[in-house]
Amino acid sequence: MKEMNDMISCKEMVDLIMDYLDNNLDDEAAKAFDMHIEGCEDCHAFLNTYKKTVSLTHQITYEDIPDELSKRLSTLLKKKKDN
Ligand SMILES: [Zn+2]
């Protein structure tokens, strides 16, 4: 049963996002990630925030994004889900 892999929750997206941006996801996970991004505005915004942070600073890589920012974003995402 592979169906579960096609359904990623927003919480799981937070865990996958850095691997995604570093191209460390396998094909299946990357596909599931893309599918979720297309259907979820919150995670789309989340991804863009990550990208913007890296392009603004120019010096850090995705892996260097501070835990605090990561935590803040994931908290934001979880809060949105509650509404
Ligand atoms: Zn989502």
Image: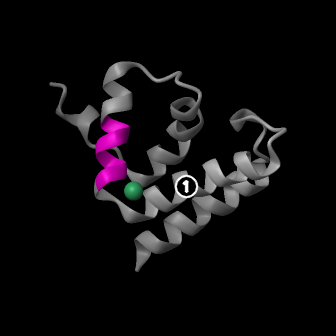
Please state the horizontal and vertical placement of residue 44, each as a whole percent of the image. 44, 57
Judged from the image, the quadrant occupied by ligand 1 is bottom left
Q: In which quarter of the image is residue 30?
A: top left
Residue at left offset 69%, top offset 37%: 62
Residue at left offset 34%, top offset 44%: 8
Please state the horizontal and vertical placement of residue 79, each as a whole percent of the image. 52, 72
Indicate if the residue with disc 1 has its beta carbon within 8 Å of ligand 1.
no
Report the quarter where the C terminus lies: bottom left
The segment highlighted magenta reads 32-38
Location of residue 19 with respect to 78 vertically, above or below: above
Nearest the eye: 31 or 7? 31
Q: Residues within 10 Å of mark 1 (few under 14, many from 20)?
A: few
Majority secondary structure of the magenta segment?
A: helix
Q: Name the residue under label 1.
A: 48
Q: Quadrant of residue 59?
A: top right
Q: Quadrant of residue 58?
A: top right
Please state the horizontal and vertical placement of residue 21, each as a whole percent of the image. 56, 34
Report the quarter where the N terminus lies: top left
Location of residue 72 with respect to 63 vertically, above or below: below
What's the amino acid at mark 1? Answer: Asn
Question: Magenta segment: does it hold 46?
Answer: no
Residue at left offset 55%, top offset 55%: 48
